[in-house]
Image (cartoon, helix red, strand yellow):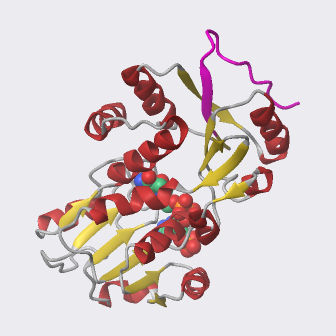
Amino acid sequence: MSQKIVMPEGGKRLYGIIGHPLGHTMSPALHNWAFGELGIAGEYRAFPTPPEELSEFMAQVRELPLSGLSVTIPHKLAVGNFLDGVSERVSKVGATNTLYWQGKRLLGENTDVYGFMAPLTQLATRPKSALVLGAGGAARAVVAGLLEIGVPEIVISNRNAHKAEGLAAEFAVSVQDWDERSGFETELIINSTPLGMLGERVGQNPLPEGLCLSPHQTLYDLVYNPVRTKFLQQGEAQGCRTIDGLTMFVHQAVEQFRLWTGQTFDLGQARKLIAALLA
Ligand code: NAP
């Protein structure tokens, strides 16, 4: 029996996140804080939804209706079957992380691509080369984002070489063997693996220890818990520019919020809120 969603009282609009398992997601704290800050009558809830309940859940999204949804693993592909249309970015990445309404049409967007690109578009010069570590779901958004901002040389390196080759072929970029990943000289290195994440992988580093980096390089970690990972610390110690995963997280969230409400929240305050919650 799937969950029966009860609408909030007082005519508030309802938003939320679906995934399974949902674990401890920061999205409800962030979006509910933003509704409060901007005086918007909205409520954002976590809806843990196993795959076999997705169809019934999506029927309720339309009937109630829910005003917007974040979508995470394992629904990012399957949710596309319940929509009236998807953006060009979703078509390229093959995954949806946001549902929103345009009139009576329920549409899919991928704000991870936007969130990933946002800090890179603020750099004085665009990187000419990028090494992407990992070839999972997040790496797809990363490669799509790098192509969108016009990085001419993109190389993917992954523990499972077949996955790297498949992703590289799809996006017409190159591959580097995982054991030789530090041999590719690049302006930008992106960690899109979970190495370094809180839990059993905390303290792990996707780069070999003692690797010599140059201050002209930028290290970008998608992991945001902890915010200062071993990977970023290694870059900082050698004078590299670093971009943390929290920056991407708040940017992808503000783009969701804009699609849902037409408004944006303060990114600095949002960052402080999440950093405090993570601490
Ligand atoms: P995923 O689909 O499971 O992919 C994980 C990738 O990491 C795979 O390529 C996998 O390689 C590689 N990997 C896993 N363990 C490894 C290990 N011990 N050594 C080497 N490579 C390893 O996960 P995802 O959805 O892409 O997410 C990746 C990370 O990005 C997560 O930490 C997630 O939290 C983060 N993320 C952050 C944001 C943000 O807003 N900051 C957004 C999305 C994702 P194999 O193919 O060899 O298994």
Image spot of residue 171 (x, y percent):
55, 83
Q: Answer with the quarter of the image where residue 176 lies.
A: bottom left
- Residues 169 and 134: in front is 169
Q: Residue at x 41, y 28 (%)?
A: 34
Residue 206 visible in rendering: no
Residue 232's place in the image compared with 32, above or below, is: below
Q: Residue at x 75, y 35 (%)?
A: 61
Q: Is residue 38 magenta?
A: no
Residue 34 visible in rendering: yes
In-image side of 234 versus 71 (left or right): left
Q: Residue at x 51, y 63 (%)?
A: 138
Q: Residue at x 73, y 52 (%)?
A: 79
Query: In the rendered view of the protein, which quadrant contains the C terminus?
Result: top left
Image spot of residue 206 (x, y percent):
37, 70
Query: In the rendered view of the protein, which quadrant contains the N terminus?
Result: top right
- Residues 184 and 121: in front is 121
Residue 182's place in the image compared with 28, above or below, is: below
Residue 26's place in the image compared with 126, above or below, is: above
- Magenta segment, prevailing SS (helix, strand or loop): loop
Image spot of residue 117 (x, y percent):
38, 63
Q: Which residue ends up furthest to the front in the rendered image?
A: 103
Q: Answer with the quarter of the image where residue 170 lies.
A: bottom right
Q: Answer with the quarter of the image where residue 85 lies.
A: bottom right
Image spot of residue 78 (x, y percent):
75, 56
In-image side of 227 versus 236 (left or right): right
Q: Is residue 4 magenta?
A: yes
In-image side of 238 versus 194 (left or right): left
Magenta range is: 1-17
